[in-house]
Image: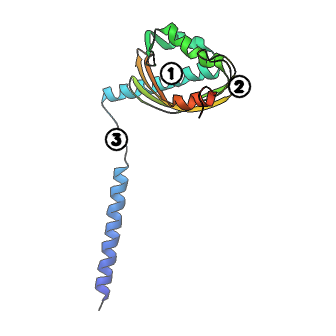
Amino acid sequence: MIDNVSIQESFVMKKTMILLLMFGALTGCVSVKVNNPELVKNAELSKRNVTFYSNVWEVAINEGRTEILDTAYVDDAILHTSPAVKGKANVKAYYENFVTGFSERKFIVKEIFADGDRLVKYWQFKGKHTGAFFGIPATGKNVDVIGCTIVKMKGGKISEEQDFMDNLVFMQQLGVIRP
């Protein structure tokens, strides 16, 4: 038989547990100020690099103003492609193929993560193939591809990039390779 005392004790225990859980949840959510200057410096560098890098692609590809690439890359920049593209002037020429080869182009940075001078960018490229693209004559086809780029920065400029994307699908969308 349940008496009033055991009901009251059970009620008090439940209230106590709820209060302890709420206290734990509230104290667990308190923000902690980071006093480590190295971490603060790294976070600031990451933020600057993300802002800079995102702007480069907005201007160079979406607006078609590739002259920004002259100041965005270090002189000895490397694009790890097949074959590798070396040097700022060659990097610019490489990306100019996208501007001259595609109209209605849109380069979208979907997500970007940074840790100091290292960035990872998840992106999407859309466009209509209306001009020569690395020697491929215009096909009039629309492309829509996604990819990921690993980036190294040096002194506030881009020093290395390596893109990962499905080139087979890209070539199929261009009509160069049959599906």
Q: Earlier in the sequence, mark 3 or mark 1?
A: 3
Secondary structure under the numbered disc 3 in the rendered image: loop
Residue occupying image coordinates x 56% and y 16%: 95
Secondary structure under the numbered disc 2 in the rendered image: loop
Residue occupying image coordinates x 37% and y 43%: 31
Q: How many marks?
A: 3
Percent of width and height locating residue 11: 34, 77
- When the figure is inspected, residue 103 is found, relative to residue 1, above or below; the finding is above
> Outermost residue toward the bottom?
1
Q: Which residue matches tag 3?
A: 32
Q: Which residue matches tag 1?
A: 52
Relative to the observer, which residue lies in front, 44 or 113? 113
Q: Which amino acid is tagged 1?
A: Phe
Structural distance between the alpha carbons of marks 2 and 1: 33 Å
Name the front one of labels 3 and 1.
1
Neighbour tally class for label 3: few under 14, some 14-19, many 20 plus, Cα within 10 Å: few
Relative to the observer, which residue lies in front, 106 or 12? 106
Secondary structure under the numbered disc 1 in the rendered image: helix
* Quadrant position of residue 169: top right
Percent of width and height locating residue 17: 32, 67
Image quadrant where one finds the N terminus: bottom left
Q: Which residue matches tag 2?
A: 140
Relative to the observer, which residue lies in front, 102 or 36? 102
